[in-house]
Image (cartoon, grey):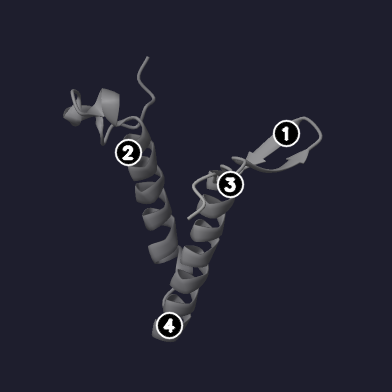
Amino acid sequence: MNTNLTPINPIAFELCPISVHWYGVISGLGALLGLYIATQECKKRGVSPLVFTLPIAIISARAYYVLFEWGYFKNHLNEISANGMEE
């Protein structure tokens, strides 16, 4: 068994000065797929896609932020639902 595995480069591709990482590509594709599925379901049910997709997008974005900043939010649970506009 060969144990000399080469790690995957975290950068998927570069556009001049911008490096696009794999986690960004995967997250973006997941978001687009979720939006597509939600839109199709709304069409089936005869509901405007904005009724579901906009609130879900806002909640999901906040959940994503809280997940990656959990070191802070685990001690400040009351701020999870804050809008971030306080100064």
* Residue that numbered label 4 is attached to: 46
Q: Which residue is mark 1?
A: 18
Q: Is residue 46 left or right of residue 17?
A: left
Q: Is residue 16 above or below residue 87?
A: below
Q: Nearer the viewer, mark 1 or mark 4?
A: 1
Task: Return the mark for residue 57.
Answer: none
Identify the mark at residue 67; answer none if there is no mark.
Answer: 2
**Could you tell me which residue is drawn at 28 percent across and 25 percent down?**
71
Q: Is residue 22 left or right of residue 40?
A: right
Residue 22's disc is 3
In front of the other: label 3 or label 2? 3
In this orientation, which residue lies closer to the viewer: 83 or 26? Answer: 26
Front residue of 17 and 62: 17
Direction right: furthest residue: 16
* Disc 3 element: helix
Question: How far is disc 4 from disc 2 in space, using C-alphas?
Answer: 33 Å
In the image, what residue type sits under mark 1? Ile
Chain-order first, disc 3 or disc 2: 3
Query: Residue most toward the bottom?
Result: 44
Earlier residue among tags 1 and 2: 1
Tell me where residue 66 sits by quadrant. Answer: top left
Position of 66 relative to 31 (above/below): above
Mark 4 surroundings: few (<14), some (14-19) or many (≥20) residues within 10 A: few
